[in-house]
Amino acid sequence: MIRPLYKSFLQPPQQLKTGNTGLWYDKFCDQWNDEDWTLSVNDKTRANPKLNWIKTVTEQPIGCMELLEESISRLLRFITTKKGIFGIFTTKSRFVMGLGRNHPVENGFAWHPTLGVPYLPGSSLKGLVRAWAQQDAEPPMPHVDEILGSAGKAGHVVFVDAIPVEPVWLEADVVTPHYVGWNCEKPPGDWRGPTPAPFLVTKPEMAFVFALLPARPAATETVKDVFKWLQNALTDAGAGAKTSVGYGRFCFDDSKTRKYKDLLDKEQRDRREATRRTEAQRTPEGRWSLKLEGKSEWEILDFVREHLEKEPLPNADERQGLARAVIATKLPEWWCRGKKRDHATKVGEAKLKARGKLVLREAGSANGK
């Protein structure tokens, strides 16, 4: 382990406010004892430097909401485009990933490299699903190696890293091994003093998005089956470390999943609408159609009176574009018969017929000749 030599000439900030929490937690520990450069408990004050450092990331939610929203939005668009499937799962117990990673407090923690939040790598999820399908499922799932792949052979399903959908609350947990540092001369025994070791965990009720992709178009239906395996594995077996004692249990959250699907649908509709309006701006008819959207029959008649009858537009293409946009509303069909579609329209039969024929004539319709 590299000694934190920066302490001799530069003190890092004492409290994390913004930035990558994972980078802060892994690289900027400043709780070292000056005498021996360790994080051992002070015999006099009983202060626990490891616990103190863990608490620096437990006093506020972890993660930037704007960055998480942007990442989730990009992820869900990608999943939808590739015919994948996603779901929101909520932790029902404490969850921890990466305990075996090196860290000054002994127990590590898995941080997303760019978002600085807890996450589950897709490779770990694939291993979890494989273990559940082959060992825990009743009966064991068929064709697991063919679907998930084996040595030298790719599978049909791609597992995406699971990330939280909103800032995450963390907390300190503790494990207390009673038999530490024993050897042949000092065997383990109940008389030996326990040594509490704090470690960082994710609180219950934190929501994560899990997603799968088909490795090839023909595997779309297979993805749906594997997603059910994933759901069962997260519920029954759990993900991450210490699952044998109840950690890492997730539950499918139907309401939050529906919420994100609705948001995705709205985002897609908005993009389609933006594309439609951009395309419409390229022609006179399209531009006038946008201006007429949401207008009442009386307002459209006023457009005709103003731009085709009273002071005709000087540009012939613009006049034709306006006339064709009006025809697209189906109103001139009524006007040419001297009728109005909206009873609130205050225009007489003669003017309706005249403006109807004017619109048809400007549009170049044979009916207007």
Image (tube, helix red, strand yellow):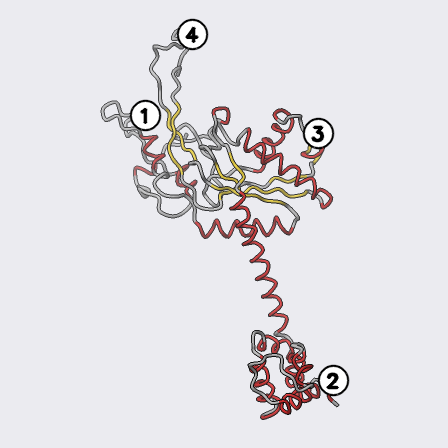
- Disc number for residue 142: 3
Residue at numbered disc 1: 40
* Residue 339, horizontal then vertical, whole percent: 65, 84
Q: Nearer the viewer, mark 2 or mark 3?
A: 2
Closer to the N terminus: mark 4 or mark 2? 4
Q: How many labels does the image show?
A: 4
**Quarter occupied by the N terminus:** top left
Q: In this view, does 220 lie above or below 265?
A: above
Q: At label 1, which amino acid type do we have?
A: Ser
**Residue 222: x %, y % from top left:** 69, 39
Residue depicted at 40% across the width and 47% down the height: 19
Q: Which residue is farthest top?
A: 185
- The answer to whether residue 10 is visible is no
Q: Distance between the residues labelled 4 and 2?
A: 103 Å
Of residues 229 and 35, which is closer to you in this image? Answer: 229
Say which element carries label 1.
Answer: loop
Question: In screen coordinates, is 291 left or right of 182?
Answer: right
State which quadrant residue 281 falls in: bottom right
